Image: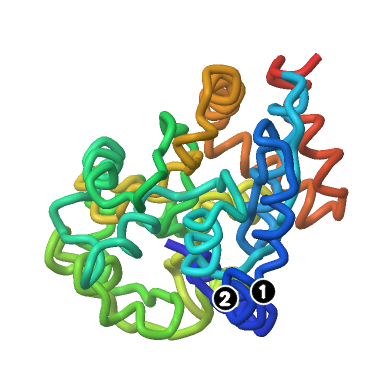
Amino acid sequence: MSIKKITVTGVAVLVATVLAGCAGNPLAADTANASSSTIAIGSAAFPENELLAEIYAQALESKGLTVKRNFNIGARDIYLAALKDGSIDLMPEYTGALYSSLVKGGAPEGASTPEQVYGALQGVLPAGTQTLPMSAAEDKDTLAVTPGTAQKYNLKSLTDLAPVSKELTVGAGAGWDETYVGLVGLKKVYGIDFKAFKGLDSGGPLTLGALQQDQIQVANIYSTDAAIQSEKLVVLDDPKHLFQAENIVPLIRKDKANPTVSEALNAVSKALTTENLTSYLAEVTVNKKDTASVAAKFLADTGIKH
C-alpha cells in the first residue's frame, strides 16, 4: 500500500490544528450552513484520490444532487475526523489501508483477499459511517519486472520468482525489507530470498529508474502506476495473496447514503477497474490534463453520464 496515502504534509498539519477545535473548524461551519441534501466530498492529497473524488462528485451531480468539493485534505486521520464531525460526508478509500489504520497494531496477516479485508473492515468502521460495495479496482503493492527479465526467467507470478530470486536485486521504499508485506512475507510465504535489497522510494521515480537501468531487477510498484502501461512492465501475480487487498470503496456517512446517492456511487464502483483507472490517472499525471475533464471522460466512456 502506498505511503502516499498516509503522508502528513505541512498543509495537513495546519488543517489538523484547525479541525481540533470544532468551533474554529471552517469546514464544519460550511456544513452547518449547507442544505441537508448537499454531499460534501473530500479527498486525500494525491492525484489518484482527487480524481476518484471528482468522479464521485460528477456522478452525483448527474443525478441532480448538490456537491461540495473539499479536496486535498491531507492524511487519513485528518479526513476521518472531518467525516466524524460532518465536515465531509464522503471519501474514496482503500480497503486495506483503511482497515490497517483502524486496527491496533495494523491489519493482521489473516486478512488479505478482497473479501476478507472488506468483511473485516465492517467491524472497525468509525461510528456513523459505512462503506458501499467495493470496486474491483485496486491501488496496491506489486512486484514488477521489465519484459526482458520476465522473458529471461519465465516470470509470471511470485511463485516463479522464488527459484531465481537469489540472482536478482529488489528495490522498494526504505524499511520495506523489514515489513511482512515486503521481504519478510515474501520469504515466509513464497520462499523468495533476493540477492540484495535497495532502499529507494515507495513506488516512485527512483525505483522505476533503477529498474529501467538494471540497477535492480524487481521493483515494488503500485498497481495503478502509469509506468506499468507506458513501460510495458510485467506485474507478477500474487496467488497466495501476500499483498493486502486495496480495493477502492466509497466511505460515507450513514445519514447521506440514500438510494439515489448509493445508486450513483455503485455505478462508479462497478465501472472502475485497475486497468482503466491506471489509464485515466495517466491522463492527469503524465499528460497533465485537468482532473475535472478526465473525470467527465471516464463517466462518458463508461456510460454513467451521458
- Tag on residue 24? 1
From what the image shows, is residue 185 above or below residue 70? below
In this rendering, position of residue 42 left or right of residue 192: right
Residue at the spot 66% in from the left edge and 69% down from the top edge: 25
- Asked where in the image residue 199 lies, by quadrant, the reply is bottom left
- Tag on residue 21? 2
> Marks 2 and 1: CB-CB under 8 Å?
yes
The quadrant of the rendering that contains the C terminus is top right
From what the image shows, is residue 228 above or below residue 251? below
- For numbered disc 1, what is the local secondary structure? helix
Task: List x then y, in percent, for residue 225.
Answer: 60, 55
In this rendering, position of residue 218 left or right of residue 53: left
Crowd class of label 2 (few under 14; some 14 to 19; many from 20; radius 10 Å): few
The quadrant of the rendering that contains the N terminus is bottom left
Amino acid on which disc 2 is placed: Gly
From what the image shows, is residue 157 above or below residue 6? above
Q: Nearer the viewer, residue 53 or 173?
A: 53
- Can residue 155 be seen here? no
- Asked where in the image residue 140 lies, by quadrant, the reply is bottom left
